[in-house]
Image (spheres, rainbow, N blue to C red):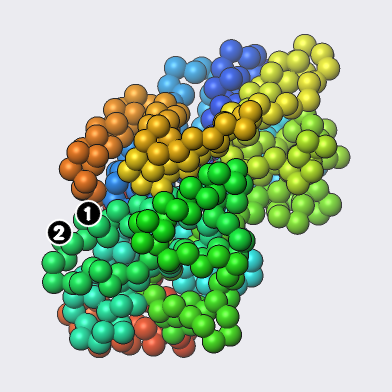
Amino acid sequence: MDTNLPQTSQPRIVIIGCGFAGLRLAKDLAKSPVQVVVIDRNNYHNFQPLLYQVATGALEADSIAYPIRKIFAGQPNFFFRMADVERIDSGRNTVVTSVGDIGYDHLVLATGSLTNFFGLESIEQNAMQIKSVPNSLNLRSYLFQNFEKALLTEDPGQRQALMNVVVVGGGPTGVEICGSLAEMRRDVLPQDYPELDLKKMEIYLIESGAEVLGPMSKESQEKGKTYLEDMGIHLRLNTHAQRYEDGKLYYSDTEFIRTQNLIWAAGVNGAAIDGLPEEVIARNKRVNVDTQNRVVGQRNVYAIGDVANMVTEEMPRGYPMLAPVAIQQAEQLADNFQRLLKGEELKPFKYLNKGSMAIVGRNRAVVDLPGDLHFSGFLGWLTWLFVHLMTLVGFRNKVITFISWGISYFSSDKALRLIIRPYKRHDFNDQQGVVAAEHKVATAQYHPPVAAPNAPVVGG
Ligand SMILES: Cc1cc2nc3c(=O)[nH]c(=O)nc-3n(C[C@H](O)[C@H](O)[C@H](O)COP(=O)(O)OP(=O)(O)OC[C@H]3O[C@@H](n4cnc5c(N)ncnc54)[C@H](O)[C@@H]3O)c2cc1C
């Protein structure tokens, strides 16, 4: 079954994933004599660098996501199927999806990455992640739900655990969410919860390395650390999260932090798809590719973006999992497809590093530019806002985000604090429920606290 895709004499290029890489490749093939079929499990492209702002109520989910069909309206060679790709059958040049099989002449994996919990099962079952729109909406609801519960409990230890937040992973994502939570604690929560003593709300950042913002320059790392400390974040460097038990995050055999809000931002693996030979899957589950993004040993299968493991002299550990790498690999592959169609030799990928940046809060951001240039503070913050605004997909999203940021800047408010989840009566009416649910976490790992962090989100 070919899922009703039109038959064509043109070569069919199937792209799995419409993230940064898949989106750019499909766009760049608009004028090529090929049929482009994009498959994604979501019907929207999402801008992951701003997910943490959805999680902390600064932006609506709709302003960082954009419907795929709308992006490609008016591109006649584009076809979309919303489906989960389950397996690649390279012998039959087919991908097996949740809606049927789809044949290809060329296949491109642009499936991105998945959270890596490093085998820490108790953490995987209880921590919240920020990898998708539903994750972020869930995180927001869950945080506010715990504040509602904090009002109800008479046990000070339990109240503290409901207010404490522990973020694991001191890379840009962990740092950004900590900064945003600290602003929420200062500007939003005291307005909404005057009955709670918010001075007691503690935010911890746990990082296994000696620095935060590991991939950035020494200057940015130092500045980032200072910003976090100024904002009252407790940094635990050289510290490994070990397990989550009884509402406690252990970072050694005996030391722990009590929290009902555990956020995991400590690592990712490639989102490889079953069916490729084992030897092309690297340890971090990325797919080994050559310098033209062709999967090693495959004639017509490619991988780009986070899922691609391209090891070169310049990048002995593979290219970083960053949006600019994904976009540039997509551009190069689109160019190489044109060459392929003309029978020309393919060109190797060359990365143009445009720098990196991270935001910690209002007027606080760090920027590294090529040529050992670094800056921070208001200028860094402005640069971060501008770059992110310009890279957002869709005019509407740019305008809404700009307005939301403008309002937040002048009002110090984050407007979005709706709890949108299925309502369970005992969550709020029965204080025993809180205690019982805590007990559940300790005894049955598959039933996380009262409102499960990984429970499906309703609405948005
Ligand atoms: C919270 C967060 C913050 C970040 N901040 C930054 C930043 O500031 N700067 C930066 O450069 N990078 C940042 N990144 C990294 C950046 O988002 C990634 O490098 C980039 O998204 C990679 O693009 P991609 O196209 O390879 O994958 P993705 O953008 O992840 O897209 C993968 C797509 O594949 C789809 N998919 C996956 N598997 C399947 C399947 N089996 N079937 C169907 N569809 C599938 C997914 O639904 C998704 O749409 C951040 C990432 C996160 C999570």
Q: Where is residue 17 in the image (x, y as percent from the top left)?
A: 57, 39
* Foreground of the two, 320 or 203: 203
Q: In this view, does 212 lie above or below 335?
A: below
Q: Is residue 383 above or below residue 453?
A: above
Q: In this view, does 331 lie above or below 455?
A: above
- On residue 77, the disc is none
- On residue 191, the disc is 2
How packed mark 1 is, by other alpha carbons closer than 10 Å (few <14, some 14-19, many 20 or more), is some
Which secondary structure, mark 2? helix
* Foreground of the two, 275 or 417: 417
- Return the residue at label 1: 187
Q: Is residue 159 above or below residue 23?
A: below
* Marks 1/2: CA–CA distance: 7 Å
Q: Determine which quarter of the picture holds residue 410.
A: top left
Residue 351 visible, this angle? yes
Q: In this view, does 162 lie to the left or right of 360?
A: left
* Foreground of the two, 457 or 99: 457
Q: Determine which quarter of the picture holds residue 313.
A: top right
Which secondary structure, mark 1? helix
| Contact? badges 1 and 2 (CB < 8 Å) | yes
Residue 46 visible, this angle? no
Q: Where is residue 15 in the image (x, y as percent from the top left)?
A: 62, 34
Label 1 beta carbon within 8 A of ligand 1: no
Label 2 beta carbon within 8 A of ligand 1: no
Quarter of the figure with the N terminus: top right
Q: Which amino acid does label 2 sit on?
A: Gln
Residue drawn 34% across the image and 83% down it: 437
Residue drawn 58% across the image and 80% down it: 252
Residue drawn 84% across the image and 52% down it: 279
How packed mark 2 is, by other alpha carbons closer than 10 Å (few <14, some 14-19, many 20 or more), is few
Q: Which amino acid does label 1 sit on?
A: Asp
Residue drawn 30% across the image and 69% down it: 201
